[in-house]
Amino acid sequence: MNDEVTDLYQEVILDHSRNPRNFGPAEGADLSAKGNNPLCGDRVTIFLKLNGDRISEVKFDARGCAISLASASMMTEMIKGKSIEEAKTLFRKFLALVTGENEIGAGPDLADLKTLSGVSRFPTRIKCATLSWHAMVGALNGIDEEIKTE
Ligand code: FES
């Protein structure tokens, strides 16, 4: 990846981590789940409101590193308005991207999430990037207990 692209990617990640979108607890959520990264103890809670099988609102509350906050922020923007199945499919694609199974650009619908593809070279950072996603899918699957990235 050339330096300009790397800089752009870092800018997008920094912007989302400093000004996370859809941040804060949600009143009256239909579904919620907590995620925990045992490597660092950072936590995230995802709140979802549904309209039929569509995600009409999504918020998150978290304490975590820049990568985890940026990933959660981008995720909330991406899954709002999606159906439950579409959100789960997006999770699978994102997982493939950050674990290095996808070539960059292979998932046109991943948009800004592609800026996180660099974590594939750092196994511990993959957990940071996927923390909120595991919690989101856990919420959709009705899992009650805290979801770990392990
Ligand atoms: Fe804790 Fe990244 S260091 S989630």
Image (cartoon, rainbow, N blue to C red):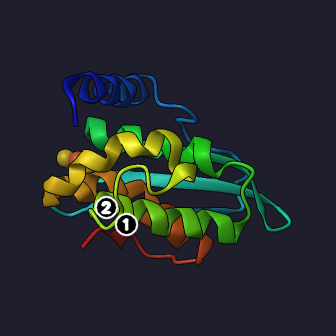
The percent coordinates of residue 18 (x first, y second) are: 37, 23
Q: Amino acid at mark 1?
A: Ala
**Residue at left offset 64%, top offset 44%:** 26
| 89 or 33, nearer to the observer | 89
At 22% from the left edge and 56% from the top edge, which residue is drawn? 120
Q: Quadrant of the N terminus?
A: top left
Tag 2: amino acid: Asn
Q: Tell me, yes or no, if residue 40 can be seen here.
A: no
Q: Quadrant of residue 63?
A: top left
**Residue 100 seen:** yes
Q: How far from the left and from the top, in percent, is residue 110?
A: 51, 50
Mark 1 Cα within 10 Å, few/some/many (few <14, many 20+)? some
Label 1, on which residue?
A: 96
Residue at 57% from the left image edge and 51% from the top image edge: 109
Residue assigned mark 2: 36
Q: Residue at x 36, y 63 (%)?
A: 102
Q: Please, what secondary structure does the residue beneath circle 2 have?
A: strand
Residue 50 shown left or right of residue 112 in the figure: right
Find numbered disc 1 in the image and state the secondary structure of the residue it sits on: helix
Residues 116 and 50: in front is: 116
Q: Given the current orientation, which residue lies at the most extreme right position?
A: 52
